[in-house]
Each structure stands twice: as structure tokens, then as C-alpha cells.
């Protein structure tokens, strides 16, 4: 049977970065894999960021969002049926930060998927730099995604992990699970806490064998309600030399809202650029394929204020924001 892993994490936690590292290790170890991007949103930029994995030993597939929950569920099942017939070693599912965990487990117990797939690992990424108290929606996502995980992986650590910091993150995650009436509590044994650049083969083996936990909790929000924290800005053409400056200006402008992450793609001379920015750093790098869209993830986002920043330099007359 094909093992299927689920890699989750709240908006901006760094799960796509971990996915790149984990998938690359599996490919280099000789496994034939697929990565399935499962997104409730209308545009999936993470797919563009994963293009470097695509090749003989890795398929990239995507479920387009922009539809109701039932339609999204059908598309998810259809895509898994297609992958189930490929005789792969492993499929990694990366949902957007907006995800109903039950969809994953329920679908895999349906025929014919239950004959082709076995659940491997549920891995949840937690940001070491997240604030002590998040919004109610983000606290719900943190708790619901961690509730079933086999391993909680701490992101954005540098050097040796600080025990006090790790315990603080554990306490935060456990409070989030308590708030949704989940009985599970994570301990140090459930955590992988080290700088990702120092991961060894044993660390990746731990991820691939992490397993999962069956737990229950109260659903406080639907994906549609949480999705209001994501805004799309499309048909953008910016001067290449000013892109970094514009992104920094938006991130630092409090009137734009509390921004966790800005990601997307922009046209450049002879190709495309992918954008991946947090408050800590902005990464701009060339890619072979792209889509002209900027996605802003955060809370209390002012679409109008971000419009002002982008329109000041944008030369595409078809610009639109959602």
C-alpha cells in the first residue's frame, strides 16, 4: 500500500519549507513520491515553490480551491484515486493553513482509497516565533492541527534549541488544544526541535515513521470563516528592482493589518520570480513557471491599503484584488 503523509501548520509557519526538505530526502533515498497541494483558496502559490521537486521520481498535483466544501472533498478524493493507481511509495499532502482535519481521515477510509493507502505520518509545524496569544481563529487552527500529529516540528530555530522556548511552545499548543476540548497533551517526546539545516537521515526517518493520533475536538470555525484572513492581489507587474522595497513597505505598514506572510509570483525579464516574505526576511528567487499574484496572509488585513502600495508601481491594467 502507498503511505500517505499529512503535513500541516498554521499560516506562515514554514510547512512548505519543511516539505521541500522532507520530499528531497525521500527522493534522494530512492522513493517514488507525489506531493498533493490541497488548498481551499482560489490560488495555490505553494505549488510554484515546489517546482524544483518535479521529476522522474516526484509528481506534483494540486486541488484547486474556490469551491464549496463538498466540491472540494470530491476533488480531493478524485485526485487521490488517480495517485492510488500510480503505485507510488509515498504521497505527501500539504493543505493550506486553512484545513478541516477530518477531511483527510474520512476520505482515506472510503472505498477504493482504503485498499490503496495507509496513513503514514501526520506532521505539524509550529513556528518558534509565534506570539504568545494568537487570534481565536489561529488558536483554533493551531490546536486542531496539532491534536492528531505524530510529531510536532518546531520551525525557525537557529543553532541549539532552547529548552525554555520549546516548553513555552508546547504549553501554547496544549492550551490551544484544551480550548477546543481535546484531551490530548503533547510532551517533549512528541517534538522535533532543531535547526532544519542540521537534520540527519535519522531525523527524516523519524518524520516518515511518526504515525498519528486519533483524537476528537470541538470545531469552532469552518474553513470559509478562517479564509477571510487571506487576500489575493492579481495581475501585477512591478519594477523588478523595487519588489523587495515594496514588500517591506507593506509588511511594516501597520495600517495594512497584522501580516504574517506575503507569498506569490511576479513576472520578470525572461521568466518569473517567486516571493516568500515574513517579518523576519524576504526571499525573491527566479523560477521557470509562475503566476502573477501576491497573496497576503494575516489578520485585520486592509485590502485597500495594500492596493495603494501596489497600484503605485503596478503597470498591469487588469489589476484586481479579492
Image (cartoon, rainbow, N blue to C red):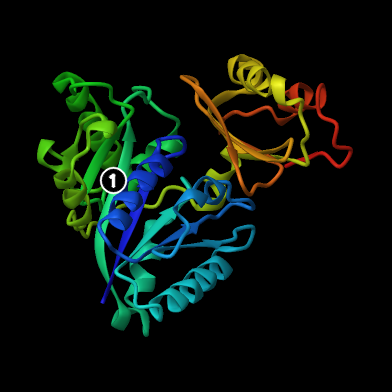
Which residue is identified by label 1?
Answer: 146
**291 lies above or below 127:** below
Q: Position of residue 195 (x, y in %)?
A: 25, 29
**111 lies above or below 264:** below
**116 lies above or below 171:** below
Which structural element holds mark 1? Answer: helix
In depth, the one of 139 and 312 nearer the eye is 312
Q: Position of residue 83 (x, y in %)?
A: 43, 74
Residue drawn at (53%, 55%) of the image: 39
Q: In which quarter of the image is the C terminus?
A: top right
* Viewer can see residue 180: no
Q: In which quarter of the image is residue 84?
A: bottom left
Left or right of 124 in this view: 138: right
Left or right of 244 in this view: 160: left
* Viewer can see residue 48: yes
Q: Where is residue 257 in the image (x, y as percent from the top left)?
A: 61, 23
**145 lies above or below 284:** below
Residue drawn at (76%, 26%) of the image: 310
Q: In which quarter of the image is the N terminus?
A: bottom left
Left or right of 272 in this view: 201: left
Q: Where is residue 12 in the image (x, y as percent from the top left)?
A: 46, 35
Amino acid at each position: 500500500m502507498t503511505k500517505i503523509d499529512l503535513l500541516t501548520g498554521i499560516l506562515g509557519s514554514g510547512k512548505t519549507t519543511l516539505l521541500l526538505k522532507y520530499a528531497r530526502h525521500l527522493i534522494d533515498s530512492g522513493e517514488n513520491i507525489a506531493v498533493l497541494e490541497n488548498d481551499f483558496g482560489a490560488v495555490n502559490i505553494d505549488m510554484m515553490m515546489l517546482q524544483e521537486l518535479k521529476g522522474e521520481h516526484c509528481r506534483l498535483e494540486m486541488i484547486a480551491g474556490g469551491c464549496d466544501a463538498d466540491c472540494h472533498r470530491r476533488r480531493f478524493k478524485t485526485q487521490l484515486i488517480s495517485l492510488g493507481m500510480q503505485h507510488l511509495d509515498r504521497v505527501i499532502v500539504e493543505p493550506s493553513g486553512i484545513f478541516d482535519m477530518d477531511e483527510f481521515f474520512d476520505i482515506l477510509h472510503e472505498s477504493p482509497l482504503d485498499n490503496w493507502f495507509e496513513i503514514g505520518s501526520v506532521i505539524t509545524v509550529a513556528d518558534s516565533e509565534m506570539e504568545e496569544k494568537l487570534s481565536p481563529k489561529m488558536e483554533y487552527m493551531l490546536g486542531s492541527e496539532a491534536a492528531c500529529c505524530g510529531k510536532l516540528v518546531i520551525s525557525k530555530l537557529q543553532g541549539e534549541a532552547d529548552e525554555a522556548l520549546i516548553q513555552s511552545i508546547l504549553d501554547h499548543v496544549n492550551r490551544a488544544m484544551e480550548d477546543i476540548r481535546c484531551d490530548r497533551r503533547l510532551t517533549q517526546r512528541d517534538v522535533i526541535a532543531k535547526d532544519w539545516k542540521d537534520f540527519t537521515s535519522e531525523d527524516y526517518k523519524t518524520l516518515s515513521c511518526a504515525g498519528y493520533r486519533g483524537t476528537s475536538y470541538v470545531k469552532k470555525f469552518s474553513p470559509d470563516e478562517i479564509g477571510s484572513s487571506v487576500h489575493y492581489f492579481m495581475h501585477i507587474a512591478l519594477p523588478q528592482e523595487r519588489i523587495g522595497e515594496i514588500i517591506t513597505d507593506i509588511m511594516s505598514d501597520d495600517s495594512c493589518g497584522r501580516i504574517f506572510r506575503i507569498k506569490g509570483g511576479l513576472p520578470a525579464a525572461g521568466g518569473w520570480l517567486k516571493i516568500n516574505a515574513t517579518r523576519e526576511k524576504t526571499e525573491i528567487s527566479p523560477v521557470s513557471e509562475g503566476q502573477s499574484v501576491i497573496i497576503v496572509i494575516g489578520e485585520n488585513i486592509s485590502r485597500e491599503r495594500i492596493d495603494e502600495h501596489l497600484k503605485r508601481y503596478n503597470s498591469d491594467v487588469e489589476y484586481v484584488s479579492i
